[in-house]
C-alpha cells in the first residue's frame, strides 16, 4: 500500500493506491472534503521494457469565475520529469493550460504542492479538503488522464508531422472527464462523464468533443466516482 500525503497552506490531499482498497482518510473528516475514486484497467495499458505504463493524471476544479484549483497531479506532469524529453505538454494539455500559473509556481518553488507519484495497482482514492473560498460553490471537476505509446488505427506510430493524427510518442491523446458538483449541502456522489480529449501534441488547452477516433483510451479507468462529504463541524 502506497500513501502520498500532499500539503498546502489551507488544504490537504492524499492519494492512496492499492490492490486492496483505499486507506483511511488523511483529511479532516469533520470538515467539507471530496473523494475521487478511480479503478484502473492495467491489463489494457501499454508496456515499456516489460513494465506496465500507468496513466498520468490531473484532477482540478474550476468555479464560475474561472478560478482554478488543482486537486492532484502526477509528479511527472507537474515537474516535466520525462524520460528523453524536457517537456511533454501533450501528456495533459488541458490541465497544463488551465493551471498554468499553479504549475509554474510548483516548478519554481521546488516544494510538493499537489503532486504525487504516478499511481499503480488496481484502485486509487484522492482525498481533498475543500478550501474555504470554494465551499458552497457549484464547480466543475475535471479529470485528465493519458498513457504514452497508446497507439490505435488512427493515432498510429511514426506518422509524418503534417498528418492530422501525428502524436509523437503519445499515441491516443489525453481523455478528459467532467462532473459538475456542489461543494456544499449534504453528502452526494457524482459520476464524471467523458467530455472529450486533449490535443495529441499539446498545442492548446481545448477539450475536443469528437471521440470517434479514440478507442482504448476511453477505458483507462473501469470506474470513476466523486463524492462530496459535508463534514459535521459547524
Image: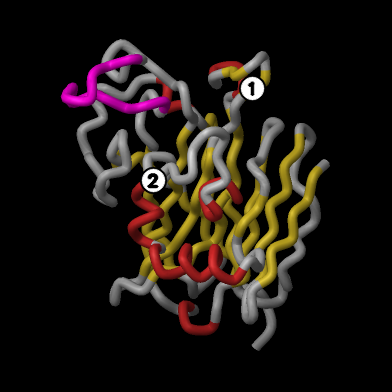
- Residue 50 is inside the magenta segment: no
How many residues crowd mark 1 within 10 Å: few (<14), some (14–19), many (20+)?
some
Q: Main secondary structure of the magenta part?
A: loop
Residue hosting label 2:
89
Sequence-wise, the earlier of marks 1 and 2 is 1
State the image quarter where residue 114 is shown.
bottom right
**Residue 82 image offset from top left, x and y in percent:** 55, 40
Instruction: Determine whether, in the image, residue 107 is placed left or right of residue 234.
Output: left
* SS for callout 1: strand
Front in this rendered view, residue 222 or 71: 71
Q: What number is the disc on residue 112?
A: none
79 over 56 or under it: above or below: below
Q: What number is the disc on residue 52?
A: 1
> Quadrant of the image for the C terminus?
bottom right
Magenta-colored span: 158-169
Q: Residue at x 65, y 52 (%)?
A: 116
- Residue 167 is inside the magenta segment: yes
Amino acid at each position: 500500500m502506497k500513501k502520498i500525503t500532499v500539503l498546502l497552506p489551507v488544504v490537504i490531499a492524499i492519494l492512496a493506491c492499492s490492490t486492496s482498497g483505499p486507506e483511511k482518510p488523511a483529511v479532516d473528516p469533520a470538515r467539507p472534503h471530496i473523494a475521487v475514486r478511480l479503478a484502473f484497467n492495467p491489463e489494457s495499458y501499454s508496456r515499456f521494457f516489460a513494465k506496465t505504463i500507468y496513466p498520468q493524471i490531473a484532477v482540478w476544479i474550476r468555479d464560475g469565475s474561472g478560478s482554478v484549483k488543482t486537486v492532484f497531479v502526477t509528479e511527472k506532469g507537474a515537474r516535466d520529469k520525462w524520460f528523453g524529453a524536457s517537456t511533454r505538454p501533450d501528456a495533459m494539455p488541458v490541465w497544463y493550460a488551465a493551471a498554468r500559473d499553479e504549475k509554474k509556481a510548483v516548478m519554481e518553488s521546488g516544494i510538493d504542492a499537489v503532486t504525487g507519484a504516478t499511481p499503480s495497482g488496481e484502485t486509487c482514492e484522492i482525498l481533498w479538503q475543500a478550501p474555504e473560498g470554494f465551499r458552497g460553490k457549484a464547480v466543475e471537476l475535471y479529470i485528465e488522464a493519458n498513457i504514452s505509446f497508446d497507439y490505435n488505427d488512427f493515432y498510429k506510430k511514426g506518422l509524418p508531422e503534417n498528418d492530422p493524427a501525428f502524436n509523437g510518442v503519445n499515441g491516443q491523446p489525453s481523455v478528459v472527464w467532467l462532473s459538475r458538483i456542489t461543494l456544499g449541502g449534504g453528502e452526494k456522489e457524482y459520476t464524471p462523464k467523458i467530455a472529450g480529449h486533449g490535443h495529441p501534441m499539446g498545442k492548446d488547452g481545448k477539450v475536443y468533443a469528437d471521440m470517434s477516433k479514440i478507442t482504448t483510451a476511453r477505458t483507462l479507468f473501469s470506474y470513476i466516482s466523486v463524492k462530496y462529504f459535508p463534514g459535521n463541524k459547524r
